[in-house]
Structures are given as structure tokens and as C-alpha cells.
Amino acid sequence: MSNDYPNGSVLLYPDGQSVTCLERSKDNDGEYLLVEHKIIRNGAINGPHWHPVLTETFTIKQGKMRFKVNGEETVLGPGEKLTIFPGQVHQFWNESDTTLVALHEIRPPGLHWQMFALIHKLECEGKLNGKGIPRNPLWLGLAWEAMEGYMAGPPKIAQDLVLGGLARLAKGFGYKVFVQK
């Protein structure tokens, strides 16, 4: 196993939100990453997107989380679980009156920890807009690449060309998706 996923690492945001790497390992079903999200703010956590390879399973520990998967909405509470399969367009929201705490399993882990670490770095440096999107297009390209997926709406080929091109340009200028140790 690579040490790029330091078990126990915590990304603490200025607003008190956190992402904790609980485990990166391998079992009979392959490699996985298990993180815990503590989300303070209500509302959308991300925009609609999909992954060609990743399977994500969310288990709610505290609060309520709303999911929209392939157009169907579901609200989950403590102890409830939802799995999102490759190709399913999904988005989620914090619907809690208090802090939302959710376990998030990603199979295979891909670059998800690096994506969390990059977004954390950019937020702490004030480099994200009000919707959590990098202001600098080069950072946007790298964040998109680390997501290992696609936004719903724009054609896949356009995202590969434009955002993938920005990621390649960013790397050419020495930008790096790094891991918080």
C-alpha cells in the first residue's frame, strides 16, 4: 500500500468541517479508501457528477444527508447507507440541523484523498470561490483530474479536452496535486 493515504490524517477546514482518512487498505473486493466527513454547513456539498470507475458508499453516522442519484432523491439518517455505482450521476446535500457526520468508502480509491487534500489546501489559502470551485483555472484542472469523474451536463469529450488540458498545463508549470501528511 502506498503511504499517499496516511491513516488518521485529518484535513481541518477554517469553518470546522473536516475530512479524516480512517483507512486505506485492500480486502477481497479490492483496494478502498474510507474517510469520515464532518460537514457544518447546510446545503449542497458538490455539484452533479459521475465517475466511470469508482463505487462510493455513504453511511450516515449523525445528521441527515440528501442524495440525488440518476434523478431520484433520497434522504438518509443515522445508520442508513447508500451505494453509488460507476456511471450514476449523483449529488449530495447536508440536510442536518447539526453537524453531518458520514462515512465515505471509495472503491478503488483512485486519487480521492489527493482531491480532498488539494481542495482543503485551496480553501485554507482562500483560493476557492463561494461555491468551492478553484478560482485559478490551472488548479481547477488538477482538481477535476483528481476527481476521476465528470460533471453532469458538459460532454465528456469537452471536459477531457478543456479541463484535462488545464491539468496538463498546470503540471507543465509545476503545479502538483499533493498529499497532506
Image: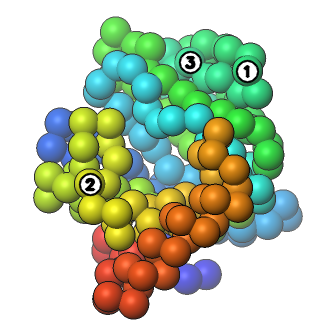
* Depicted 65 relative to depicted 14: above or below: above
Residue 71: mark in rendering:
1
Residue drawn at 55 percent across, 71 percent down = 164
Residue drawn at 77 percent across, 59 percent down = 53
Residue type pointed to by label 2: Arg
- Mark 2 lies on a secondary structure that is loop
Return the residue nearer the eye: 135 or 75.
Answer: 135
- Mark 1 lies on a secondary structure that is loop
Q: Position of residue 121 (x, y in %)?
A: 25, 61
Which quadrant would residue 74 be assigned to in this image? top right
Residue drawn at 59 percent across, 35 percent down = 48
Q: Position of residue 23 (x, y in %)?
A: 54, 60
Which quadrant would residue 39 be assigned to in this image? top left
How much space separates mark 3 and mark 1, taking CA atoms?
A: 12 Å
Return the residue nearer the eye: 106 or 132.
Answer: 132
Q: Position of residue 102 (x, y in %)?
A: 50, 33
